[in-house]
Amino acid sequence: MSTAAPVVARSLVKRFGDFTAVDSIDIEIAPGEAFGFLGPNGAGKTSTMRMIGCVSPRTSGELRIFGLDPATDGRAIRSRMGVVPQLDQLDNELTVTENLLIYGRYFDISKRDALAKAADLLAFAQLEEKANSKVDPLSGGQKRRVSIARSLINDPDLLLLDEPTTGLDPQARHVLWDRLYQLKEQGATQVITTHFMDEAEQLCDRLVVMDGGRIVAEGSPQGLIGEHVRREVLEVRFGYGRNEEMVPQVDGVGARIEVLPDRLLIYSDDGESALSELHRRDVVPESSLVRRSSLEDVFLKLTGRTLVE
Amino acid sequence: MFRQIKVSVGLAAIVQPAMFLLGVGLGIGELVDAGGNTDLLDGQPYFAFYSTALLATTAMFVLTQEAMWPTLDGFTWGEANRAMIATPLTPTDVLAGKALHYLVRGVIAVGGTALVLALFADTRSLGLIPGVAAGVLCGLAFAMPIAAFTATQEYDTAFPAILRFGITPMFLFGGAFYPIEQLPDWLEPVAWFTPLWHGVELTRGSVLGGLGAEMALLHIGVLAAFVLGGTLWARWSFTRRLLV
């Protein structure tokens, strides 16, 4: 694996007609790093990912993958890359093994080598018993794992995962996270887009928060939380539509208050004592909850909007 | 993929032309030949005249269909083409794969038709071999431009119109059932510009003879121009569709 940064972007821009999907972003991803793009739908994550994947020409700016230019060396770059697309693009009528074999042939891997590799990958993806099953009847989680296995057929130096767990049930997500974590331990560089905060916190060493095509924050998940919000959040509900009018009465209880239609978020280093303070003031919410701050709160603070709307 | 459907593809390649032959060729052939005047058909029995055109029309039907729904599927529902360009393959490679598929599919369909024709004394000839090549060339003259068009489409709504107002009229007026000299004078030149007429003349001439070298070259040239033009267009539209 090359020691140079696998992905470097400077003032990278992508426009579709008048619409600017990616608005001059700078990123540098280190070898072996799990790097995340976090943001709501339409933030520019997938457009960025497609440019890195050499399937979308950039409008302007610099982009180097493994030190090469996607505009001229797309084929060479893609031969060292694995892509797990947002929607599984599997051949449903073929068996799991055939899917991997044909994909391997696209990389000019011999049939024999591809079959051997496919067997290894299916063991890794815990799909050995499905090797000769057609793809169509598999569950969503199993199809995702076939997609991941397929993306590894060429031993990629860089793995692109576009919303890898969207649409999966919690159990299937955890199986997938486990596999991705194992890959990371083996040293593969991963680029992940997601709009799930917990996923970013689980999988990413470092991430950028995107909104409207721009990068609004960058750092490690814990670093971003420490930098932008307090350690804990007290969530209180006073009834729909009544939360706004309660703001004066809870003022000063925490370091910062965020008003949502259905609840108030009170940021504090100690959520429990904030709740005690409310009770001391005889302010009794319909319900209350103390939790640790998450990237969701970071996003809310940075953009004024919740992530999944 | 192909392995799984080869039985149905192979059967269709034999059964479909056989039905057309028996239904139209033999049935109407009886009537026409009973009229006694086959001058217009260069002295050929109607069965031979009509059945040799099937080499071209079968290719047209089969490859037009292939260039429509199954090709659109790669761009939309199945997204197989997107999976391919995430590998070292380029949109031009994807197109080359499609073209190869059309070629194989065309050889099977036209080859099946030729096998059926070889059963009948009127059409049993070594000319069936170049006839198959001519039929496949005619099919590709449809497949490549239609594939190019398909790559520009989100939905399949335009396909029935192309079949109804493009392909079916060509089948009826393109010289398969009767010489285009029989058409009204104003319609005859229209036929000259359709790939099907050139394909029919070429397949018929290959099997039954009576086609001069110059005319044969002209037909080949026109069909090749459709294939080449369609390929260039498809290269552009595949790239535009896949690299956005």
Image (cartoon, helix red, strand yellow):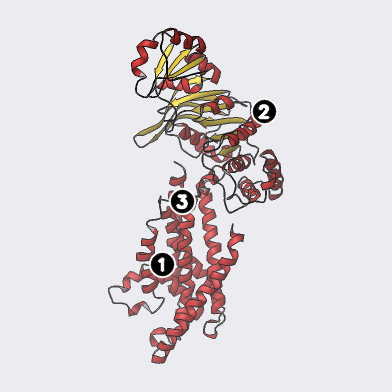
Residue displayed at 47% across by 31% down: A45
- Say if A308 sits above or below B6 in the image: above
Looking at the rendered image, the quarter that the N terminus of chain A falls into is top right
Q: Which mark is residue B195?
A: 1
Which amino acid type is marked by label 1?
A: Pro
Residue A111 is situated, as x and y percent measured from the top left of the image, at: 68, 50
Residue displayed at 51% across by 42% down: A87
Identify the subunit bearing mark 3.
B
Q: Which mark is residue A185?
A: 2
Residue displayed at 59% across by 57% down: B1
Which amino acid type is marked by label 2?
A: Glu
Residue B236 is situated, as x and y percent measured from the top left of the image, at: 43, 49
| Circles 3 and 2: CB atoms closer than 8 Å | no
Residue A55 is situated, as x and y percent measured from the top left of the image, at: 50, 40
Identify the subunit bearing mark 1.
B
Question: Badge 3 is on which residue?
Answer: B235
- Say if A152 sits above or below A243 in the image: below
Discs 3/2, front: 2
